[in-house]
Amino acid sequence: MSERNDVNQNNDSAQLPLIRLILADDDYFIRESLKVLLGLDSGIRVTGTASNGQEALELIEAGTPADVVLMDIRMPECDGVEGTKRIKARFPEIQVLMLTTFDDDEYIIQALQNGASGYLLKNVPQSGSFKASRPCITEIC
């Protein structure tokens, strides 16, 4: 993908790169809720949403800008493990962060072996998971 030349101004007027993110989750309500939550952070722009890993890949192939794909690990058609494998094979510069309600070591290990940069648990209260998502997303970029 192209270089990130969008910037965000924080309260200290320091220039921070804007993180462009594609969100993939098969649950429409979760997907749209996360889009709203992440949109509250002026340093993150949700550039696209998908209901499975293949749709996320197709968005990237169609030119949707992305630095990070935040992807559910279990989805029908193309789950997060396979989606990560496909995205990283074509676009190794894009970081993939898994999102799961499952503390399922096997799926998480497979996703990491396929190139995922890390994971967040959905079932952690907001203060524990989504408040921590910005530093986590920033770190992998």
Image: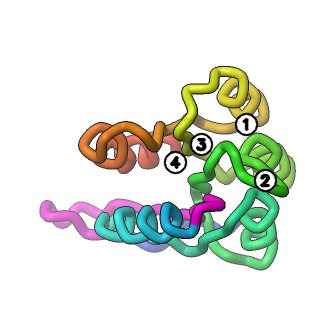
Work out whether residue 82 or residue 10 is closer to the camera in this orientation and state it.
82
Q: Hey, what amino acid is under mark 4?
A: Cys
For marks 3 and 1, the one nearer the N-term is 3
For marks 3 and 2, the one nearer the N-term is 2
Residue drawn at x 55%, y 74% as measured from the top left: 47
Circle 4: element type: loop
Q: Is residue 2 left or right of residue 29?
A: right
Count neighbours of disc 4 (C-alpha within 10 A) and say few if under 14, some if 14 to 19, many if 20 or more.
Answer: some
Residue assigned mark 2: 87
Q: Is residue 108 left or right of residue 78?
A: left
Which mark, by number, is residue 141?
4
Residue assigned mark 1: 115
Q: Are marks 3 and 1 in contact (CB under 8 Å)?
A: no
Q: Are marks 2 and 1 in contact (CB under 8 Å)?
A: yes
In the image, which residues are magenta? 7-27
Residue assigned mark 3: 98
Q: Are marks 3 and 4 in contact (CB under 8 Å)?
A: no
| C-alpha separation, residue under disc 2 versus residue under disc 1 | 9 Å
